[in-house]
Image: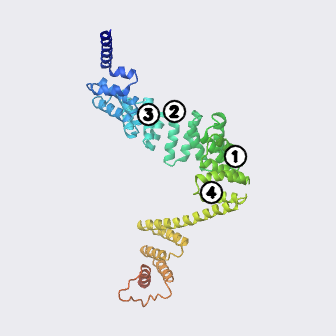
Amino acid sequence: MRTNFVISVALMMMSVSVSAQTLTARDFMQQYRYREAVEWLETQPETAENLLLKAESYEKLYNYTDALAVYERLLTNNPDDTELLISAAECASQAGNTESALKYWIKTDSLSPGNLFFQTKKAMAYYRNGNWQETIESAQTVFQSDSVPLLLRMTGDAFLNISNADSAIWFYAKSIEKNPSDYLAVSKLGNLYYAAKFYDSAINITDRYLTQINPNQITIGQLNGMANYSSGRFDEAIDRLKKNVELGDSSYTTTYFLGMSNYAKKWYYEAVKWLGKAYDLNSNDVNMCYYYGTALGRTIKPEKAVNVLQEGINKIDEMSEMLFDFDVSMAETYRNSNAYAKAIEYYLSAYKRQPDKHDLLYSIAQTYDTAKDYKNAIATYERFLKTAPKNFNITNFALAEGEKISAENFYYIVSFKRIKELQEKVFMESGKK
């Protein structure tokens, strides 16, 4: 009996072993064992059939980069094979290689001129690769035969990316007309209306979507609430934004506009509730500090109101400091590019922000000087000299042995000498006239 049992087990194991050895890539793939299919194919000759099976297995494993490499190997010997080109294009797109995807769709389209499917794919490939003008031109070819809703929206995006908002609006509207459930097109068109302060149009388009398509679409609901607030429909804004909150929307934008709508109604306790949530998400907004602090001050939390308002004041001070730096950088950039009038404009703006930075007057005078506007240069050098310390004698300036001159004092001396030179220059030029 024991001998028979051992023989039976041995035969069973041999059967399993033989069965495993006879499995092919197709067998593994039919059992959804794609990794094992790839491993088996690695041991086999690289025939066209085996390479196709390997590429398909890689795709099933979401390994689009390796799948693309296999398709490209196949295309080496079959460069005009439409099916291979399509597979390579789709894999490249899935792998995020938009440039290769575009290359393959252009090739496929060239092999079948006038094919609407390939024309559409090529236009979309241009879009995904960020070629906006080519997207528009290719899409126009498609639209001569068919109005593809997705491509209409993409064309709207392309126009928006080349700063043509009017055409973008037209294509978004057409996209919605063909596919009213496309919330992305509704959102983009609504945001364009909102940015242009066409609040009624933004409300109408979002209302239509919320009532006819999906009342629970958070992005569209938020935009609807914003537009209602901005148009003075505070009750409608509150209703819509509260609905968003019920749907789980706790974003800064929703809580901020909900708080502001209550603030506009003078419902300060509710305003504090929602502005407080927005403040916790982003306390860097000066407007937020003002309205939240003011709302707090009109309830029973004056101490917190003072803290929040002071925080806003501090931010304005910091912003003023930053704007000064921006002005100076802009001035220097314009000056280096010989745009002297713009340089002077920004130097003056910086000096207005920080009137104790007298060296800016020297920079302005130098800019006038470089621009050969000698009269303004002289006037500004003289203005700069008036800021010199009272005990600083420019006419009889002398350094003690080992003493170093400060940068500011050096500028005063240079300005004094330059005024003399320019006055002589202006006098000589006026004499020639």
* SS class, disc 4: helix
Type of amino acid at the residue the image marks with label 3: Lys
* SS class, disc 3: helix
Reply above or below: 237 against 50: below
Residue 429 marker: none
Residue at the spot of label 2: 148
How far separated are the C-alphas under marks 1 and 4?
18 Å
Residue at the spot of label 1: 238
Q: Where residue 354 sits in the image (x, y, percent)?
A: 53, 72
Q: Residues within 10 Å of mark 3 (few under 14, many from 20)?
A: many
Type of amino acid at the residue the image marks with label 4: Met
- Point out the residue furthest to the left here: 45
How far separated are the C-alphas under marks 3 and 4?
46 Å
How far separated are the C-alphas under marks 3 and 2?
11 Å
Q: Residues within 10 Å of mark 2 (few under 14, many from 20)?
A: some
Number of marks drawn? 4
- Closer-to-camera residue (284/16): 16
Residue 121 marker: 3
Could you tell which of marks 1 and 4 lies nearer the N-terminus?
1
Please state if 179 lies on the left or on the right of 110 as rendered: right
How far separated are the C-alphas under marks 3 and 1?
43 Å
> Residue at (67%, 49%) from the top-left corner?
258
Q: Where residue 65 sits in the image (x, y, percent)?
A: 36, 36
> Residue at (31%, 9%) from the top-left corner?
4
How far separated are the C-alphas under marks 2 and 1?
37 Å
- Tags 3 and 1 in contact by the CB under 8 Å rule? no
